[in-house]
Amino acid sequence: MNTSLRILGLGLGAVLLGVASGITQQESFTANPDTAGVADTLVNKSANIRYGELVLIRGGARDQQLLEDIAIEVRKLGAHPVITIGSDRLTRNIFTEVPARFDNQEPTFALRMAETINAMISVDYRDSFDILADVPAQRRAAHAKAFEPVYKKMLERGVIRTHLGNGLYPTKALAEQFGITRNELSRIFWRGVNVDYDQLQATGERVKNILAAGRDVRITAPNGTDLTVQITRRPIFVSDGVISTDDRYAGGPACQVWLPAGEVYLTPVTGTAEGTFIADTFFFQGKRIEGLTLNFNKGKMTSMTAKQGDITALRQLYNAAPAEGRDLFAAIDIGINPSVQVPAGSHMVTWMGAGTISIGIGGNTWAGGDNEVPYNLFAHQTNATMTVDGRKLIDQGTLIQR
């Protein structure tokens, strides 16, 4: 996966518009004609918007109808929407057209928004993955650091955050990256979004209880992965697609979901990650890297190598991040969505596919940790085995039902 902060903050590349935006309609890549139905799910089921709340809606011009339908659903509840529009062009030009001296400037407007809104519903608007490939890593790191307080404020206030995309939004570029057709990716995406949520919630609760009772986790795979971490008394969160009343009360990481949903995640005991995690497939700036190998000792990454593919740019972004915290093992994320399946022979990687195991380094406040460094790197495995205190929870990429 591309390295990026796994947060739903008020980042770059968005322009504030009114609900009646008047933007030019572009081709929608959703391949799901029922935008009203999707909007209903996002507003009423996932975000669980309430009367009087202030709701920020983020997305791209290609999904204008969906964004408008979301705003309509929000108003039906007596809540108040505003739409922001982003694009690859705007994201890139923030760097290429704006002087570097503004990179560290406090994002005053975004902070005011974070202090004001009650909820944010986002629709992924990326069309390509290499638009920042030639932007110096130092500039990207400076922007990430400047906007970190925005996400921190939203986390502290318990702002509801619902994001439609989760690394699978069916664009032409992503389909080509995965080696499948856009129609096939679209079918996978919408099957995942339209999963049986009651079943997903039940599975999430079962996996959460197993982890909550556990002490030691071991992840192994035929490719040489062998990683152990301790999880005793760590907070555990479930992205099951629905932000419930209990989630609102808990606040913080409990108030965020990614759709397609289906993830159980936690931060390990600090300093306990030991061993090696190898991602067979990893994408960075649209380019495939094979056999990305991360080695850990006493909870810190000690080396990053790859069997095939140039990781120079990946290293540059890592080196540009604040030294304190960038190398810390961040979190374990377990996919539980049975409706998202990786096509045989493809290069597709996911977070939520049932049996997928993801690990990361860097910031982990999104997962209930205390490392605030504005940097993340995530790697995924779809053919690994995970044991909790010696008992299998995942067996060679298959989530065990027990």
Image: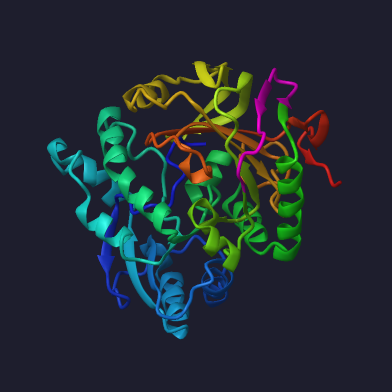
Residue 105 higher or lower than 254, as above or below: above
Outermost residue, front side: 233
Q: Judge left or right: residue 148 versus residue 371.
A: left
On whether residue 337 falls in the magenta region, the answer is no
The one of 208 and 7 positioned closer to us in this rendering: 208
Residue 312 higher or lower than 367, as above or below: above
Residue 377 pos. (x, y %): 48, 32
Q: Judge left or right: residue 281 versus residue 197.
A: left
User: Which residue is rendered at x = 43% and y = 39% of the image?
Assistant: 4
Count of marks placed on residues: 0
Residue 14 higher or lower than 291, as above or below: below
Q: Judge left or right: residue 172 versus residue 55.
A: right
User: Which residue is rendered at x = 32% and y = 50% of the image?
Assistant: 150
Residue 128 can be seen in this image: yes
User: Which residue is rendered at x = 45% and y = 20% of the image?
Assistant: 310
Residue 353 pos. (x, y %): 68, 46
Residue 214 higher or lower than 81, as above or below: above
Structure colour scheme? rainbow
Tell me the quarter of the picture where residue 116 sits: bottom left
Give the residues in magenta: 219-236
User: Which residue is rendered at x = 22% and y = 57% of the image?
Assistant: 109
Tell me the quarter of the picture where residue 272 sits: top right
